[in-house]
């Protein structure tokens, strides 16, 4: 006896397969057996009306063949796409023969009817009653075929709530959230589901060995490298690998240590909408990745990650190393959104810095100094942060390479007097006067360079230079000043230039429009991180659509429109951003003075 019904996916169609069932022939009269076998063959050959006529007679007799005949009657009507009639026959079978040994097959066919009718909740409920392990793969294929028809995020959320252990539903919800939602609660839900269900399966290639290091351990177990689809898709998948720390997220907290991460991501999402207006479709996939190398390794070797077109992040060194290796191997551009170390892009052809590296900043300041036509004696000071000393060291190296005389190089801190006392200028001084005590004539320098991330240090440095009677232009990092607290006279007391990578001209229309849209959507003023996230996604999204992002297209790798919020991008020479704004306060506002 033939019986079981399966769905098997083939290109563009689904086929029905049948396997044999055995019915105890001692319980069946020969004429009934012949009639049943003939009806089954009619179902197999597609002569459904004749088959139903013969099967109906067997059903009415309520004999041993009645449940089998009922099943085949339901299958025939199903294949005629009369799903409601098929359901009714199956319900009758279940009511009249509740102990039928092939009830799992009846439930499977009932679920298929429910799926066709769009009654997904009922279908999933029925599938959960199936206990036969042989039917599990077919049940999964049934879900995978029908459930993606759902596009209502709230309905899929409800399905996930009702069937929390269903992997197909979970994966569908992850996909819908990543493609359509910008809500933080949805992002948290997506991350939890990803941790539980992983990512959708994809075609795989031969295993490759990739290593990761975390907490002193370096796993070297071979992992499966997914195959990357290089065909034109009409859209671009962007993996955002940030430390969202959704497990710690609380809507009651107004300030979070990682708020900058959410600001970056909110800016990225607004750029996604802008790109869509330009006909460029970007799908964002957010991954909650902290300083965890093993999780980074797991993510980049997951099948879904193979379809990534751009990686933004990770923000920590070891996960970034793993992601960079993956990016280079698969020719996927990787963007470091806030890092300024050129070590991250050295010998990494597919890695980029959204910011200018510290070395690039030092070079651009040196170029500006040459335009000042001042003397060649320079003093270099820096604050307490490691970044301050790194930038100062890079600038010192640049000055020495260009044969400038560095007369003082040191860390300074504290109040203005402490800074003044710390200054020591090389050259002859009177034997009766300590080097820290200024001479009546003061000190004339070609310029002074000051790097500090402390927003109170800038004003104190200006005071310290005045106390030591040091003349000469001051070039300082913009981060050394508090633009909200420092009066405007602070910026006019001496010739002052600010190294300002994050400079944004608030008088420009694109800046005002962005701020208005951001406030309308987020009910808060955008931080500089939101603006940076917007600009980087807008630029790299356009480049993906226009030129691709490979070394051979480097000549085109620069911003050619003026609708960016900051100063744009230029990668024509190297993989760090070569645009480094230097500004000066003129006519009541800061203006950029370099190209």
Image (spheres, helix red, strand yellow):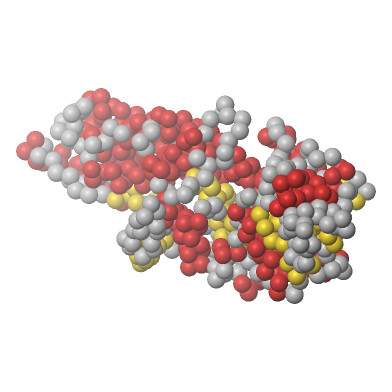
Q: Where is residue 257 in the image (x, y as percent from the top left)?
A: 57, 38
96, 434: nearer the viewer = 434
565 or 490, which lies in front?
A: 490
Q: Can residue 451 be seen in this view?
A: no
The picture places residue 41, in percent across and down from the top left corner, at 25, 49
- Whole-percent x and y of residue 511? 79, 46
| Total numbered circles | 0
Q: Which residue is drawn at 60% across and 61% down?
A: 341
Whether residue 488 appears in this view of the structure is: yes
Q: In the displayed structure, would residue 284 be above or below residue 446?
A: above
Q: Which residue lies most toward the front here?
A: 432
Q: In this view, does 149 lie above or below 222?
A: above
Residue at screen point 60% across, 54% down: 386
Nearer to us in this view, 226 or 567: 567
For the C terminus, the quadrant is bottom right
Q: Position of residue 318 (x, y in %)?
A: 47, 57
Looking at the image, residue 581 sits to the left or right of residue 140; the answer is right
x 75%, y 75%: residue: 403
The residue shown at (26%, 39%) is 105
Q: Which residue is outermost to the right?
A: 587
- Left or right side of 565 for 241: left
Name the residue furthest left.
Answer: 26
* Quadrant location of the N terminus in the rendered image: top left
Foreground residue, 331 or 384?
A: 384
On screen, residue 2 versus residue 437, left or right, reads: left
Farthest top residue? 95
């Amino acid at each position: 006896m033939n019986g079981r019904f399966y769905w098997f996916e083939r290109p563009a169609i689904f086929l029905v397969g049948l396997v044999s069932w055995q019915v105890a022939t001692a319980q069946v009269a020969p004429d009934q057996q012949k009639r049943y076998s003939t009806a089954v063959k009619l179902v197999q050959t597609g002569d459904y009306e004749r088959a139903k006529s013969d099967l109906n007679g067997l059903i009415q007799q309520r004999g041993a063949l009645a449940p089998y005949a009922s099943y085949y009657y339901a299958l025939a009507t199903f294949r005629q796409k009369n799903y409601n009639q098929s359901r009714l026959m199956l319900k009758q079978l279940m009511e009249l023969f509740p102990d039928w040994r092939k009830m799992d097959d009846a439930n499977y066919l009932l679920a298929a009817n429910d799926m066709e009718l769009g009654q997904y909740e009922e279908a999933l409920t029925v599938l959960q009653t199936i206990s036969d392990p042989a039917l599990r793969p077919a049940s999964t294929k049934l879900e995978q075929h029908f459930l993606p028809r759902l596009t209502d995020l709230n309905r899929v959320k409800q399905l996930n709530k009702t069937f929390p252990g269903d992997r197909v539903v979970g994966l569908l919800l992850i996909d819908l959230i990543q493609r359509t939602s910008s809500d933080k609660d949805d992002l948290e839900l997506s991350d939890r589901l990803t941790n539980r269900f992983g990512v959708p399966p994809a075609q795989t290639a031969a295993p490759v060995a990739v290593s990761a290091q975390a907490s002193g351990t370096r796993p070297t177990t071979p992992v499966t490298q997914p195959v990357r689809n290089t065909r034109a898709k009409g859209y671009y998948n962007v993996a955002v690998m940030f430390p969202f720390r959704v497990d710690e997220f609380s809507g009651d907290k107004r300030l979070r240590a990682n708020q900058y991460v959410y600001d970056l991501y909110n800016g990225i999402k607004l750029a996604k909408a802008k790109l869509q207006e330009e006909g460029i479709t970007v799908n964002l996939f957010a991954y909650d990745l902290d300083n965890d190398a093993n999780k980074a390794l797991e993510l980049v070797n997951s099948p879904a990650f193979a379809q990534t077109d751009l990686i933004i992040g990770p923000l920590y060194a070891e996960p970034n190393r793993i992601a960079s290796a993956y990016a280079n191997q698969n020719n996927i551009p990787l963007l470091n959104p806030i890092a300024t170390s050129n070590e991250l892009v050295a010998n990494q052809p597919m890695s980029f810095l959204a910011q200018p590296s510290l070395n690039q900043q030092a070079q651009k300041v040196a170029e500006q100094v040459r335009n000042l036509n001042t003397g060649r004696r320079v003093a270099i000071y820096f604050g307490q942060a490691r970044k301050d000393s790194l930038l100062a060291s890079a600038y010192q190296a640049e000055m020495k390479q260009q044969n400038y005389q560095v007369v003082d190089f040191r860390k300074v801190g504290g109040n203005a007097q402490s800074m003044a006392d710390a200054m020591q200028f090389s050259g002859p001084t009177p034997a009766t006067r300590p080097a820290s005590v200024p001479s009546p004539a003061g000190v004339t320098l070609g310029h002074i360079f000051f790097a500090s991330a402390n927003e109170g240090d800038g004003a104190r440095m200006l005071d310290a230079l005045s106390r030591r009677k040091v003349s000469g232009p001051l070039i300082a990092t913009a981060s050394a000043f508090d633009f909200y607290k420092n009066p405007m006279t602070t910026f006019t007391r001496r010739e002052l230039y600010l190294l300002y990578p994050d400079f944004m001209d608030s008088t420009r229309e694109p800046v005002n429009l962005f701020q208005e849209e951001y406030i309308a959507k987020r009910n808060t003023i955008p931080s500089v991180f939101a603006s940076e996230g917007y600009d980087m996604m807008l630029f790299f999204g356009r480049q993906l659509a226009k030129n691709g992002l490979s070394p051979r297209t480097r000549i085109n790798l620069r911003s050619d429109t003026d609708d960016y919020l900051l100063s744009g991008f230029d990668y024509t020479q190297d993989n760090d951003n070569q645009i480094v704004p230097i500004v000066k306060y003129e006519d009541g506002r800061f203006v950029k003075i370099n190209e």
